[in-house]
Amino acid sequence: MFKNLIVYRIGPTWQPQLETVVEQLAKAEFAECSATQEKSMGWVPPRGDAHGPFVEAIGGQWVLKLMIETKAVPSSVINRKVKDKVAEIEQATGRKPGKKETKELKEEAKQSLLPMAFSRQGSVGVWIDPAARLLLVDASSQGKADDVVTALIEQIEGLTLTLLQTQQSAGTAMSGWLVSQEAPAGFSIDRECELKATDDSKAAVRYSKHALDIDEVRAHIEAGKVPTKLAMTWQDRVSFLLTDNLQIKKVTFLEGVYDGAGGNKEDGFDADVAIATGELVQLLPELVEALGGEVELA
């Protein structure tokens, strides 16, 4: 839970009402792809219980889950089927199909093959902090987060979201931390980093399980390379990988964080959510402060 975080600021006009959100998400409950449907998205109970609520409220934090199912037919299979159909048309009519007809043949081939295609399902967690007016998507890519945000805005009336912005870019801040070898208060620099050139060469240097307090790293930065990823730890409790576009990846809760959570399986979900969000609601403001504070949007 919460392995990757893309953080959004909730717009000022939306007033969070738990019962209303539950009702609105229920109208877009997940249904599996039909025989000729390529993609299906919908909301499922985050606890995993059949007929459970679509939002779990734990310690003032709301947890949601979007299920995504996709079906894909390999392009090589489609092309082979189209090639056979084109050959049939040429043999029967003596003419070669044009671009428009060939495109239609590809679509027909895909639709005929979709019922036989294997489907793949995956879920994306969403965490809403109503008090802080933040929404966080547990996604490793911006594309997947965009799917979630689109689904949320379509279903939750009046909700507006913008990516969290800080006064100083994460890339610039990470450069300063690596050159000075001084992490912001409460944080430490770990042993993973990626540096990329900003020119057309797109040259990249990656360090893994490697000390970063070396002249070589500083030399790369002075030569114009910019950190795009940097592993860090907060308060010896949470480790993560910060990216230059302010995504938080590979979130790991360190030894001792879950001590005393108990082993009761029935309330394990509640304990996990409470502990994880309890740590992250402290980490996030400190990270934003380390980046110069949040940009106040008009």
Image (cartoon, rainbow, N blue to C red):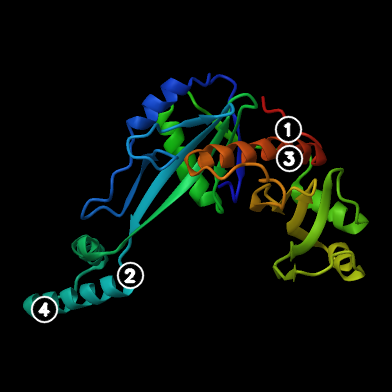
Q: Which residue is mark 4?
A: 94
Residue positioned 39% across, 49% down in the render: 68
Between 115 and 80, which is closer to the camera in this rendering? 115
Q: Which residue is mark 2?
A: 74
Q: Label 2 near label 4: C-beta < 8 Å?
A: no
Crowding at dot 1, Cα within 10 Å, few <14 / some 14-19 / many 20+, comes out as few
Name the quarter where the C terminus is drawn: top right
Residue positioned 73% across, 36% down in the render: 282
Q: Give the distance between the C-alpha atoms of the residues marked 3 and 4, in whole angstroms.
A: 70 Å
> Mark number for residue 283?
3
State which mark lies toward you, 4 or 2: 2
* Amino acid found under the numbered disc labelled 2: Pro
* Amino acid found under the numbered disc labelled 4: Gly
Q: Label 1 near label 2: C-beta < 8 Å?
A: no
Residue 35 locus on image (x, y percent)? 20, 55
Q: Which residue is mark 1?
A: 295
* Amino acid found under the numbered disc labelled 3: Leu
Crowding at dot 2, Cα within 10 Å, few <14 / some 14-19 / many 20+, comes out as few
The answer to which of marks 4 and 2 sits earlier in the sequence is 2
Q: Give the distance between the C-alpha atoms of the residues marked 1 and 3, in whole angstroms.
A: 18 Å
State which mark lies toward you, 1 or 3: 3
